[in-house]
Image (cartoon, rainbow, N blue to C red):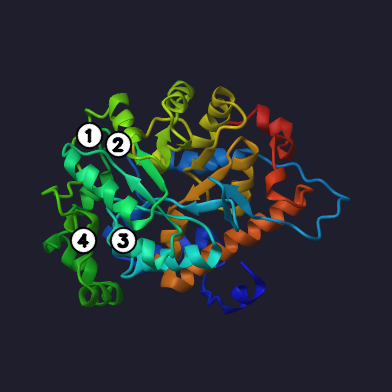
Amino acid sequence: MNDETKKNIKLSKRIFSIKEARVVAQKKLPKLIFDFVDGASGDEKLSKINYTALDQVRLEPKVLRNVEKRKLNKTFFNIDYDYPFGFAPMGMCNLTWPGADKMLANASIRYNVPTCVSMASTTSLEKMYEISKGHSWLQLYIFQDENFVKDLLQRAKDTGYKVLILTVDVAILSRRARDEKNGFSMPFKIGPRQFLDFATHPKWSLTTLLSGIPKPMNYLTSKNSKQVFKRKENRGSTDWDTLRRVRDIWKDNLIVKGIMSPEDAYKAKNEGVDAICVSNHGGRQLDCATASIDALPRIREKVGRDYPLIFDSGIRSGSDIIRALALGADFTMMGRPLMYGIGADQEYGLNRVLEIIREELNISLGLVGLTDINEVNDEVISKKYFKNMKY
């Protein structure tokens, strides 16, 4: 992103940290919507462990090095990006605020980073690719109706997508207590329980009413299937043969997201998967799982130095990205911080969150004595904390 682009970005005047964006979003959004974005599975311990575990990884400052000029650009799948992060796939984003999908697509152009289009996107995969000017990757769940999957992949090919993310950690949807308590359901419905919540947030409610209730457009625009979006659809039959069938159909870059086991990572690599996203779904699946940052170095050791790894789950700052790169990631993804920004102040809030991340990343790189993001390795980690990392 050049200096002129930076000058033209309109930023929120009320957000000074990701934590603050979350607080503002919580005030501005209906409880049901904020809890959908912010919530996790079980007792929600893992979602907190994800970022507290990252925080335990302490960096070692280096001094008396010329770090005046610094480079943050990263190449992934032979594509040059301005930063080592992308936008994680998130379903039904327009529930957070009407037009959220478009905001993310526009930001992907502005920052020259990829945005991952969820199967449950409220904007069709074709429209997202068009708005993002090709900065989109597509995320896929496996469904009982394979005709729907084949149709979706053919649409992606015809549109121009070159990267597919197969999410594999939702064979069974976890219990999410906040959603159950609030009566949140998909397809999205408004009943008596939600009416009072929405009535006390008139700006969100009126804007959403005028824009229309968000719907999962990739389902509604499918020509060859009667597949209906069911949040709790049973995907328990998904196995390695399922992965092989997807690999046979999809000849471009394939990422498998949701791997936390070194053994699974090694097997996926041998099955011809082009990259792995180390992720526990942001703590939204198995609440008693390990933190993603704890799994990352073990997976890196198993798959070797040159195999592409993406890190996801827990990033709340630019220094978190440095930590993930230091422990073996080649690229990173983030989700909730973007939704906090949009919930707090729409596109201004999203831009502000991304500027905070960018600025923190740039500063942290220099303070560990480096000038190129591609030089980050485990030497920037304070060994005392690295060896004694605890949740």
Disc 1 packing (10 Å; few <14; some 14–19; many ≥20): some
N-terminal-most mark, 3 or 4: 3
Q: Secondary structure at mark 3?
A: helix
| Rendered image: mark on residue 235 | 1
- In this view of the protein, can residue 169 be seen by the observer? no
Above or below, 4 against 134 in this view is below
- Using residue 115 as the reference point, say whether residue 7 is left or right of it: right
Classify the position of the C terminus by image quarter.
Answer: top right
Q: Quadrant of residue 9?
A: bottom right
Q: Amino acid at mark 4?
A: Lys
N-terminal-most mark, 1 or 4: 4
N-terminal-most mark, 2 or 1: 2
Tell me the CA gap for discs 3 and 1.
Answer: 25 Å
Tell me the CA gap for discs 2 and 1.
Answer: 7 Å
Q: Are marks 3 and 1 in contact (CB under 8 Å)?
A: no
Q: Amino acid at mark 2?
A: Val
Q: Are marks 3 and 2 in contact (CB under 8 Å)?
A: no
